[in-house]
Amino acid sequence: MWIFLPLIFKEGWKCLQYSLLVAIIFILPYWGLFPLYKHLVIALFIISLFFVTKKEVINLFSNRLVITLFAFIIVTFLSAFWSESQVVFSVEYKLNFNRFKYYFLLIPAIYFTPFSLRQIKEFFLLMALAPLGTIIIYFLNVFFDFNSYPVLFFHGNSKLLTHYLINNFFILYGLSYFYLLMFDKLSQEKYKNALLLFGMVCIYFTALWIDKASSSRLILVVFTIIATVIPFFYLKKGKFLLSLGLVIIMTVGLFIVSPKMIKGIETFTTALKSEHYEGSWGHRYGFLLVGADIYMEHPCFGRGISDVRERTIRYAKEHPKYFVNDPNRHFHNEHLNVLVEVGIFGYILFLLSIFYLWKMSLRERFIENLKKIFIILFLLIMMGEHYLSIYQTTNFFALFVGLVLLYEKNLKDNHTSFA
């Protein structure tokens, strides 16, 4: 009996690790639960250290994806020292520091866990299911006058959700996951499974636009592109063209029917023609010009992370036409934000990490395609908002990277064992 105690003890720790990671996945979409996140990550990291081997540590920190991603984060932290801000460690610096600090715990913690390939696939599925609570609230608000949105936009008194652009990011991942899986099942001629997944796609997609208070043009446009790309992975030329035609018809219909889409196009067109920067898309175009102008002040290594908002506020006083009826002082574009903060040098490091993530071979078609779709999704959505700066979404990115690294490690270990 005593012989089996070490085995039982080890299995118990594995169960705890699994439970902690599941809790992290289900906490991320909900602002009210997010304060628990750091405690769960620290606990998972400490437990993972009990079973880590020297070989795993070397393999992790010699991985090109990890090297470039961590180098990008370290450069971001160090950029405060060449900032023009009078206060190096300003409030803005602390906010920027906090968005990345758990990468150094979460990614190694996941990589050092003993989860199997099947369990990693379960985590990707759970990440897609996690925002179901948000979807339920959206539907309750529409059909039963739940009236939760006055407190959602800037945290307010909400004990659960936050800004709709953050809530909808998690729904978008789930929608893309089930849409991709539906085509995967169709390619295997598992039509009953595909029909069930089509139902999930309908629920998630409806949640993105059913309530005017939470619908987002950015999210819908990004999914339209994703919906166009995914069939390309599975369908032959004729069927792909048919699928592409259907997506185009639905997209055109969405732009014609949706008042928000029409308004967005009008404000963007007005901004282009008359330099009148109002409305969401008009502001974004104006902020793009503002950000490009500020970037050119320090193009190589950026101006640092301590005073970007401070500089934007000064710019707004000098050029108020770009900020009409908009109190925000950020660019609504994460690519531009990174360029302003750490210049072309830091941005290349970030793009290199994305490149190495894309190049990783995960062999199984669905997981490989999920990785590619997530990269496309994240890069596109960064063009409309600061998703690498928002605590919940940037940590979701770290979670996804950690699981992909673990999946690749398991594939290599299994191949070595087989050989």
Image: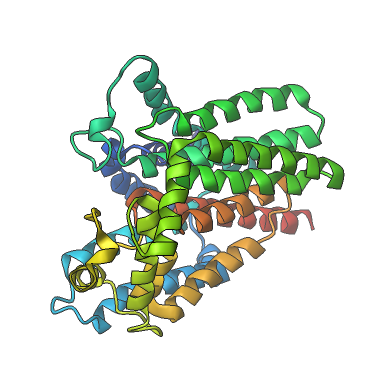
Q: How many marks?
A: 0
Quadrant where the image shows the C terminus: bottom right
Report the residue at 67% width, 38% height from top.
249
Residue most toward the top? 144
> Horizontal placement of 130 versus 406: left or right?
left
Report the residue at 34% width, 44% height from top.
40
Tell which of 165 and 96 is nearer to you.
165
Q: Is residue 196 above or below residue 69?
A: above
Residue most toward the left? 86
Tell which of 25 and 287 is nearer to you.
287
Tell which of 306 and 210 is nearer to you.
210
Q: Position of residue 248 (x, y in %)?
A: 67, 42
> Horizontal placement of 51 versus 85: left or right?
right
Report the residue at 46% width, 59% height from top.
383
Report the residue at 13% width, 79% height from top.
86
Q: Position of residue 58 (x, y in %)?
A: 53, 70
Q: Position of residue 66 (x, y in %)?
A: 51, 67
Colouring scheme, one of rainbow, by chain, secondary structure, one colour: rainbow
Quadrant in which residue 336 is drawn: bottom left
> Is residue 333 visible in the rendered structure shown here?
no
> Is residue 104 visible in the rendered structure shown here?
yes
Q: Position of residue 373 (x, y in %)?
A: 61, 50
> Horizontal placement of 296 versus 231: left or right?
left
